[in-house]
Image (cartoon, rainbow, N blue to C red):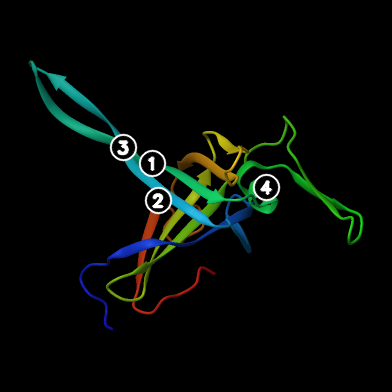
Amino acid sequence: MPLVGESLPYGLRDIKLTSYTNISTLAGTSIDLPNGRTMSFEEAEDFEELRGDDKVIATRGKGASVSWELEAGGVSLEALVVLNGGLITATGTTPAQIKKYTKKVTDARPEFKAEGQAISESGGDFHIVLYRCKATGGVSGSLSDGSFFITSCKGDALPSRITASVDVLYDFVQNETAVSIP
């Protein structure tokens, strides 16, 4: 089905997080945020007004930014490292293996790329790509009686340092044929 003028994204099929090896290079391996439930964002920009003679003379934006929120069912220790920093250690052998996530007070939260995928009722799929994300809000989870563990986090995204145009804040991608997140 050829691409139409509008996309009709439905649901959330996948969320992948990709860490950076340095400020301008992606690590290459994406980590799945298991059982993705929500990927939301809000673009905002602060404006300054020049006032004079009892009226607004001009306005100027200070540059757009994105606030985002991710939510997933269950917990992935590997995803926590991408979101929150920290370290995973593994000990033992089957059937007594232990995998432990440790976060020290000195571990900085890293920057990462987040990409979400939805199917599209108009054909193909729809991707949202947020560059240079950082969890600047809470990274949380809750264990409670009769409920699954839900991991959630909030943060901000800044323009990309790795694309050809360094000013890219985010991309919406409409595919005629569904394409998995790389």
Cα–Cα span, label 2 and label 4: 23 Å
Question: Label 1 belongs to which residue?
Answer: 65
Give the distance between the C-alpha atoms of the residues marked 3 and 1, in whole angstroms: 6 Å
Q: Residue furthest front?
A: 146
Label 3 or label 4, whichever lies nearer to me, is 4
Label 1, secondary structure: give it: strand
Quarter assignment of residue 106: top right
Give the mark nearest the N terminus, 2 or 4: 4
Q: Earlier in the sequence, mark 3 or mark 1?
A: 3
- Disc 2 marks which residue? 169
Callout 1, which amino acid?
Ser
Q: Which residue appears at 64% of the width and 49% of the height? A: 75
Disc 2, disc 4: CB below 8 Å?
no
Q: Position of residue 34 (x, y in %)?
A: 58, 57
Mark in the foreground, 1 or 4: 4
Where's residue 49, x and y in %? Answer: 21, 26
The image quadrant where one finds the N terminus is bottom left
Label at residue 45 = 3
Counting residues from the N terminus, which is met first, the one under dot 3 or under dot 4? Answer: 3
Q: What mark, if any, has residue 81 been given in the picture?
A: 4
Question: Do the residues under discs 3 and 1 have CB atoms within 8 angstroms?
Answer: yes
Spatial separation of the CA atoms under disc 1 and disc 4: 24 Å
